[in-house]
Amino acid sequence: MPPIINAEKCNACGVCADICPTDVFHVKKKKTTPAIRYPEECWHCNACVLDCKQEALSLRIPLPLMMLYVEAKK
């Protein structure tokens, strides 16, 4: 399940695309909201959520992974 981008909060800084280890995000043009290019590649590592200063990202954790998921505090 891919991350969810809240377009109202996103300032199109591109940090999520830079920090993602699996290249899930794609920035078409500078200062535009990133697109989810490879949603099936998301590791649910929470790096994009933690590094987004606008808090514009959230993750949908699949049920089998919820037993292993530990929410990190900012």
Image: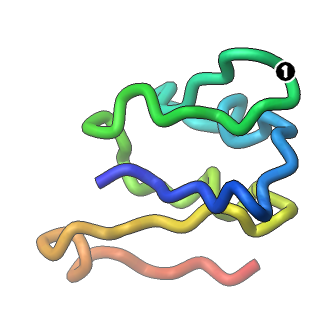
Residue, disc 1: 30
Q: Residue 52: which quarter of the image?
A: bottom right
Instruction: Characterize the local packing of mark 1: few (<14), some (14-19) or many (20 or more) Cα atoms within 10 angstroms.
Output: few
Q: Residue at x 87, y 29 (%)?
A: 31
Determine whether 69 is above or below 14 in the image: below
* Above/below status of 11 relative to 26: below
Q: Is residue 69 left or right of residue 3?
A: left
User: Number of marks in the image?
Assistant: 1
Between 45 and 36, the one nearer to me in the picture: 36
Indicate the amino acid at tag 1. Answer: Lys
* Coloration of the structure image: rainbow
Quarter of the image where the N terminus is located:
bottom left
From the top left corner, tell me how far across and down residue 62 is, in percent: 22, 67
Q: Secondary structure at mark 1?
A: loop
Given the current orientation, which residue lies at the most extreme top position?
29
Left or right? Give the position of 33 relative to 3. right
Residue 63 at what x, y percent from top left? 16, 75
| Residue 9 as seen in the image, left or right of residue 66 | right
40 displayed left or right of 71: left
Q: Quadrant where the C terminus lies?
A: bottom right
Give x and y (percent) for residue 67: 21, 82
- Furthest residue to the left? 64
Residue appearing at x 32%, y 69% in the figure:
61
At horizontal 67% and vertical 16% (from top left) the residue drawn is 28
| Residue situated in front as seen by the camera: 55 or 67 | 55
Residue drawn at x 71%, y 38% is: 33
| Quarter of the view holding residue 12 | top right
